[in-house]
Structures are given as C-alpha cells and as structure tokens.
Amino acid sequence: MAGSRMYTAYHTLKLELSQQIARVQFLEPRQASPELLQELDRLFQEFELASDVRCIILSAEGPYFMGGLSPASLQKLDPAGAQALLEYIQQVLAQIEACSKPVIAAVNGQAAGFGMELALACHVLLAAESARFSLPELGMGFLPLGGAIPRLARQIGNKRALEIVLGGYPLTAPDAYEWGLVNHVFGEDELAEKAQDMAQLFKANAPLAVRQALKSALGGQDLPLPQALMLDLHANAFCWSTADLQEGIQAALEQRPPIFRAR
C-alpha cells in the first residue's frame, strides 16, 4: 500500500490509502471472526501512529456490511471464555470510538450483531437504502456482545434502543435515519462516492483541531454541561498553541488553502 509507513498485512480486510484517506473493506463480511477482531485492533493501533491517515472509511461490498460472530464459535465458550471475549470486543470497539481521526461507516446490506455494534462505534454513519440494522442476540439467550445497549441508549434514547434490542428485527435505513441513528441515506450507487466526499471534507481540516473536536464531543457527552464546557475550553485552548492555527488564520487572510502539518 502506498504511504509514508509500512502497514501490517491483513487477511480479513483490504486496506487502501489515497490522499490521506484510509478505506477499509471487509473481505468476509457475512460473519465476524476472532481474526477480524484482532486485525481491527491492530489496524486502529497503527492508524493512531500514522501521519499519512487523516480520515477512515469502513465498508464492504455485496449484501453484508458485517455480521455477528458465528453461533458455532460462541457455543464453545465457557463463562470465563465468554467474559474474556466480551471484554476484548468492547476494547476493540472503544478503540475505534476513541480514534483521533474521524471514522465513517459506509453501510450497505446487513449490519447484524457485531456489524451493527461496529457501525455504532464509528463517528459518522452513512447507509445505503438497502442497509438493515439488527441485534438478534436476545433470541439466542445473551446480550449484544460489544456494549450496544448503552451506546444505543445514549444515541437514540432508551425507548427506541430497547425496541431494537428486544425486537431483534431489522431496522431499515430510512427508519434508522428518522430515529437519528444514521446521518444520511443514499442510493446504492452513491454510497461509496458520498463517503469519499465526506472524508475529503473532514481531512481538509487541521488534524490537531479535529482530534480536539472529537475529544470534546465524545468526552463531554456524558458529563454535566459545566464539566463538558470546561473540557471543550481546554480542547480549544490547546488549538491556540499550535502552528496549524497560525497557518489556518494566515491562509484565510491570504485567501489560499491552508497547509496543515499537525504541529
């Protein structure tokens, strides 16, 4: 892959980097796997260190964005093994949610179980008209594995979250948009292009300011308003110590595009 650093080889996903946008395509999206979890974990650790990545798009081709872990693999787990798996899944999703670069989920087809949880952990969720979101786990006797219940409740409220979790049926893309779960719904042919356009907009911003904006929004969402405002104040104050801010203001004065260097 082209870029300023060497990335690990992956088997469950395809990684393409162009113009500081990383496109991650899942190669086996029908079912999630332990190998996929490990590769997502490693990939997002690499993204945090990568100066050549300013925005990330997660996607897949065909009728699935991502499914859940196979019932056969779950059947083998004893309570201790299940606890370890739950902790690891939550760790991987928390790492994606806490990523300092914007993460866009471009969801086509089915996002079921872990696939829906993965989409929920992204900063922006775009969906094709064919997209369907579901959490069928209660029908097998357990809860969603990656913390979907508290994430959903925070994003769309308890009542709608519980309908999705208790109902287990697929939520259509238009309904997900109406409920505030999805940012935008596009035609099948538009989704990849629209995700790329949004990534271009995001990556044009000063990367250190983007990092602080994510910190303010995500870190402050569960704080009382005075504490959230204080977090935002400190995040903004940090920006005023950066060379990128000086470049951004100078570029505005000179009516030219800024050249940000994450300094």
Image: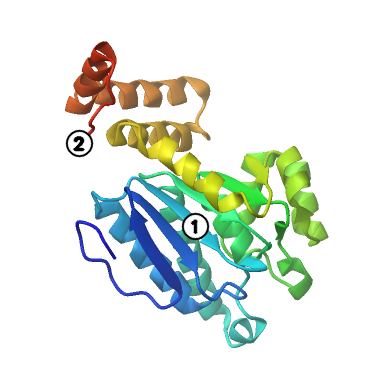
Depth check: 15 or 72 in front? 15
**CA separation, marks 1 and 2?**
25 Å
Give the structural element (helix, strand or loop) at label 1: strand
Q: Is disc 1 surrounded by few (<14), some (14 to 19) or many (20+) residues within 10 Å?
A: many
Q: Which quarter of the rendered picture does the N terminus lie within?
A: bottom left
Mark carried by residue 261? 2
User: Is residue 147 something one can see in this rendering?
Assistant: no
Mark 1 touches mark 2? (CB < 8 Å): no
| 10 displayed left or right of 151 | left
Q: Quadrant of residue 205?
A: top left
Q: Residue 60, position in %: x, y?
A: 55, 64
> Circle 2 — which element?
loop
The image quadrant of residue 252 is top left
Percent from the top left, x then y, of residue 6? Answer: 22, 65
Name the amino acid type tagged 1.
Leu
On screen, residue 4 above or below 153: below
Q: Quadrant of residue 178?
A: top right
* Mark drawn on residue 146: none
From the image, which quarter does the C terminus lie in? Answer: top left
Q: Is residue 23 shown to the viewer in this render?
A: yes
Residue drawn at 44 percent across, 21 percent down: 229
Q: Callout 2: few (<14), some (14-19), or many (20+) C-alpha neighbours within 10 Å? A: few
Residue in view at x 76 percent, y 45 percent: 174
Q: Is residue 251 above or below residue 153?
A: above
Question: How far from the left and from the top, in percent, is residue 87?
Answer: 48, 66
Q: Residue at x 81, y 61 (%)?
A: 169
Residue type at the position of mark 2: Arg
Q: Which residue is mark 1?
A: 58
Residue 208 drawn at (x, y percent) = 28, 34
Q: Closer to the camera, 40 or 27? A: 27
